Amino acid sequence: MDHILGSSASWRSSLLFSGQLHEFVAGVAGVYASPVMTRERDADLPLRYTTPVEWAAGVLARPLDLLNDHAHLEKKAAANALELLNRWPEPNPPENWVAAMTAIARDEVEHLSVVSRMLARRGGKLTRQHGNPYASALHKLVRRGQGPEELVDRLMISALIEARSCERFKLLGERVEDDAELKKLYRGLWASEHGHYRTFIQLAEQIMPEPAVAKRWNQMLDSEAELIQQQPPGPRMHSA
Ligand SMILES: [Fe+2]
Ligand SMILES: [Fe+2]
């Protein structure tokens, strides 16, 4: 059977942002190698729906709305990592569980800080309310109350959101013109979120047997491809 992920040091890339490498946590995490497999190369994403390039031009037409949505997503990603930290599996949690979730939460808070400051400098304002129908739809897939199955689902949904964000940061980075700051932001985030995606999958692989993880991941990829296409259009990271 193929590994879902390669065994390269994704942890290091998970902690890269704006040229910074948080060496301590990367060192802690780098000892782990994925036991489940893949034909995927490091930079590849497993997504089963490819966002059209026109999507980027559409959302970039309203950059402040896009940055506001983006800032909210970073805030939710940080909260999600801390929520997962609290859900460590018993009796044998992966030894890097706390370090991994702490590192991701820290990355996401840093992203939130960068994006919200950029939004403010450009004259935008973080809204109080924020709808996230894509993540809400994904969370309906969670097998609640089923112990390891629930936790694996939560990790996979986290991985899917990271992977989809990666795909879209790449499109945005390629499409942005005459705005070096935004281009740098999107390119920097790609590496960080790609590392997070891999980390969530690797943790899932430590909680359930490889075939069960691979089978569920296959289902989740199909579901995500349907759900992303059902989203309303608009200046959001996860719009259709
Ligand atoms: Fe982030
Ligand atoms: Fe992330």
Image (cartoon, rainbow, N blue to C red):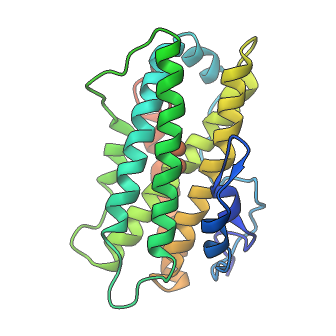
Quadrant of the image occupied by residue 8: bottom right
Q: Position of residue 161 (x, y in %)?
A: 49, 48
Q: Position of residue 91 (x, y in %)?
A: 33, 91
Of all residues, the one furthest to the bottom in this rendering is 91
- Please indicate, yes or no, whether residue 199 appears anywhere in the rendered image: yes
Q: Residue at x 53, y 39 (%)?
A: 111
Of all residues, the one furthest to the right in this rendering is 41
Q: Of residues 129 and 122, which is closer to you in this image?
A: 122
Is 227 situated left or right of 115 in this image? left
Q: Of residues 64 and 209, which is closer to you in this image?
A: 64
- Please indicate, yes or no, whether residue 222 appears anywhere in the rendered image: no
Q: Residue at x 63, y 49 (%)?
A: 192
Report how many numbered discs are placed on residues in the image: 0
Q: Residue at x 51, y 73 (%)?
A: 203
Q: Position of residue 74 (x, y in %)?
A: 45, 40
Compared with 71, 79 (above or below) is: below
Quadrant of the image occupied by residue 146: bottom left
Quadrant of the image occupied by residue 144: bottom left
Is 190 situated left or right of 121 in this image? right
Q: Position of residue 227 (x, y in %)?
A: 43, 42
Compared with 67, 85 (above or below) is: below
Is 177 situated left or right of 105 in this image? right
Q: Residue at x 39, y 40 (%)?
A: 75
Compared with 235, 214 (above or below) is: below
